Amino acid sequence: MERTAFGTLLRGARERARLTLEGLASASGVSVRAIGDMERGRSVPRLSTLAELLDALPLDEHERRALTEAARPGTSATGPGASTGSGMGASAGAGTAGPTDRPIPRQLPPDLRTFRGREALLDRLSTATAPDGHPPVVAVSGLGGVGKTSLAVHWAHRHADRFPDGLLHLDLRGFDPSGHHLEAGEALSGLLTALGVPAASIPDGAEQRAAAFRERIAGRRMLLLLDNARDSRQVRPLLPRSADCPTVITSRHHLTGLAATDEAVLLDLGPWSAAEGLAALAARIGADRAAAEPAHAAGLVELCGRLPLAVAVLAARLSAEPALRLRTVADELARTRTLLDEFTTDDPHTDVRAVFSWSYRALDAETARFFRHLAVLPGPSFSTEAAASAAAEPPSRARKLLRSLVAKSLLGRDAAGQFALHDLVRAHAAELLDREGDDRYAAELRLLDYLRHNARSAVRAWETRTIHELDHAPAPGVALLPFDDPEGALAWFRQEERTILAALRQGEDPRLLHFRTGLAQDCVPYFSALGQWADQIELQRLALDAGLLLDDPAAISQAAAALGRALAEAGRGEEADEAVGHVERRLDHLTPHERADALRSLGWVRGRQQRLPEALDHARAALAIYRTLDDPNPVARELNAVGWYSTLLGRHREAIASCREALPLLQRTGNTFSEAAT
């Protein structure tokens, strides 16, 4: 349907609810401007925004369905391939941006309305990034929470007109508590995606991605903001090396290596001055309130160590309780002496944990419990549904709790609308989760159940082969989503793919290893369909490691087979032999169906390695087992494989006979993808 249809329906629903634009904006958390653009037919909402609007309006099931259908973009393709076998993902999910498209990314986080001071450093940033024929690189360093990002973002917004071709922002997660920072390859993949490169066209290696990024950005007047860098080595491959594209980096470390090799200008950011801190606090809680107790307002700034993060969290708490005297808060903070381990300074008042815990204690019991459970969400950002599942809350309620935490400055949102925890806030939530006696295992299990069950359902929306339900029901509280078409299924995977990868990396609890190996297999169709072989390789290596720890032949074989296929598909077939060996050594320990699937995969890898006699032998062996099972689909697909390898070997009569037998089976099962191949 057209955008105007959605706008008409939205306006009618709002008017029937007797809500103004401002009223709907307040109830949903969506801006007045965005709602107005939708009602005028200028835009349609993304999935997360649509859910917020639907929850805010009193709608019956028919009205919700009508709005959902009107917001759905038009279908232009049939979705990903129906099989994870040979030929899968040749064109599916490649995206719409072609090589000649030149999107103008605007990825900057919002500027802070309450930003104060730092004028000298802002001027130095302008001087250091002024065009002079050389690639400008500026690294802003300082204590965590000191306002490095706020400074860089404020400067970028102030000078955005200098960069008509776009502004790129990337969080490198250099000091993530999990210890997993963003590798250069993954970072470059994100930058290339922002520049309009389809996922299937992104090169595999970090060096190749760096070259593609520099070629894509050459001659364009852009800004690259690299946030939270770990060290010079992490940043160096990401530099555009273009005189028209300044790079501004923030890091807790002084990036002296970058200064030595890339002539980076180093700026050291210290805490606010007393005047700056007081001005920022007054801007957040009100100038009159600060002026009523000037000594205690100044004392609060000092108790926060003049650290912008601490002042911001404290001010959010004070704003929520306008009647509370500043003296009461100052006295309470003065009695708290424990510091967050990562923020030990020579100033006894820079107690960020005290500020966090004080804000936490102001939460009602429901919000406090929800906040604690956000600690189990891996990765830099997460969806409403993932958070809802971790905390066992309905998504509609979770959305309101998330907005509440955003309002209290305990949570943020990234450019894509996902929710994001600051590194220190996540660490604090994790401490609270353990201290309060919450069941961390149950929360992590719910998150994995959310990813596994929805991945299965999403794959079922596009696969023609039988996709069985998991052998266990989801834990109570897990959000299960309906997938009516391939487009919705792909949108969910795109939303959660970083969380899936992060969940596989976060394998500390041995009781969850089986769930993680299963998740890796559930996601094979998606990463294969989109040709994201680098992600598939990482995913299956993690799953293989988990399977080896479990000493589970089925888990090892499934992960190794998928790894071998991904390596072969990525043009790295020579690396697949080790994975093949893992499978071959465990064939006798598998069930018939598992053994047939393993042999099918081995045949596929050997075929890609041009070891065709072995490929045909494996395909025949798999076919013999499939014939003993009560499912015609794998029989038909493997007949197709036998035909393919036979014709490559010049055995055309055998190939024709095999394909003739396969065709009626494929037609009966509706597998048009394999039917066309046959």
Image (cartoon, rainbow, N blue to C red):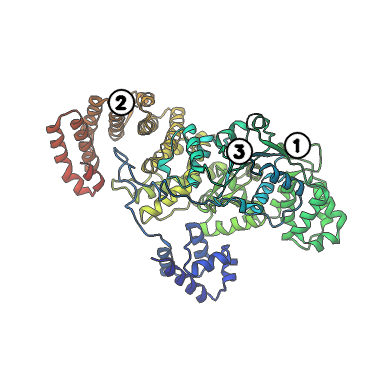
Q: The N terminus is located in which quarter? A: bottom left
- Asked whether the beta carbons under mark 2 and mark 3 sit within 8 Å of each other, the answer is no
Q: Nearer the viewer, residue 371 or 80?
A: 80
Q: Nearer the viewer, residue 379 or 45?
A: 45
C-alpha distance separating marks 1 and 3 = 36 Å
How crowded pointer 3 is (Cα within 10 Å; few <14, some 14-19, many 20+) is rated as many
Residue type, numbered disc 1: Thr
Q: Which residue is mark 2?
A: 588
Residue 56 seen = no
Query: Residue drawn at (75%, 37%), measured in percent from left and top?
Result: 344
Q: Which residue is mark 1?
A: 344
C-alpha distance separating marks 2 and 3 = 59 Å
Q: Which residue is mark 3?
A: 135
C-alpha distance separating marks 2 and 1 = 57 Å
In the image, which is nearer the foreground, mark 2 or mark 3?
A: 3
- Upstream in sequence: badge 2 or badge 1: 1
User: Percent x, y for residue 597?
Assistant: 30, 34
User: Percent x, y for residue 643?
Assistant: 19, 35
Residue 549 seen = yes
Question: On the rendered structure, is 13 left or right of 236?
Answer: left
User: Percent x, y for residue 26?
Assistant: 60, 66
Q: The C terminus is located in which quarter? A: top left
Question: On the rendered structure, is 193 left or right of 677?
Answer: right
Measured along the vertical axis of the image, is residue 155 above or below residue 517?
A: below
Q: Quadrant of residue 342?
A: top right
Q: Nearer the viewer, residue 672 or 433?
A: 672
Disc 3 element: loop
